[in-house]
Image (cartoon, rainbow, N blue to C red):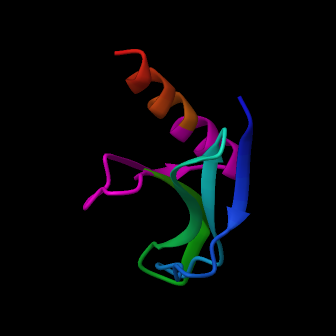
Amino acid sequence: MKVRLATDTTTEPGMRGTVIYRVTVDGTWIGWIGDYRDWKGWRYGGRRWFACWRQDGDTAARWYRNELPTRTAARNALITRTTASDSN
């Protein structure tokens, strides 16, 4: 399985995020991962990551998870979710 992250410059990060990556597995787009800084009532908190499973033709996310501590954790959560769904 070949996983590739490519910076997505067509989607603007929200919630004070700085980057969104388009994730592909074996050449097929499976979704995005990105960062944000959650509002804590004063200033902004530490960097957190989200993972979003969405593929061509989808009108909404199939799955979404946030509050992940690292980019690697977000990537792994997305891959685990999509590969688990393939086996069902």
Give x and y (percent) for residue 75: 63, 44
**Where, quadrant-wise, is the N terminus in this rendering?**
top right
Q: Is residue 6 magenta?
A: no
Task: Please name the residue shown 54% across and 84% down the image.
Answer: 43
Give the magenta-colored segment's residue range.
53-78
Q: Is residue 68 magenta?
A: yes
Horizontally, residue 40 falls left or right of residue 27, namely: left
Give x and y (percent) for residue 38: 48, 70
Task: Please name the residue shown 63% across and 72% down the image.
Answer: 8
Task: Please name the residue shown 30% across and 56% down the image.
Answer: 58
Give x and y (percent) for residue 87: 42, 15
- Where 87 falls versus 10 (above or below)? above
- Where 36 falls versus 55 (above or below)? below
Place residue 49 in its image quadrant.
bottom right
- Where 70 falls versus 17 (above or below)? above
Task: Please name the residue shown 71% across and 62% down the image.
Answer: 6
Horizontally, residue 4 falls left or right of residue 58, namely: right
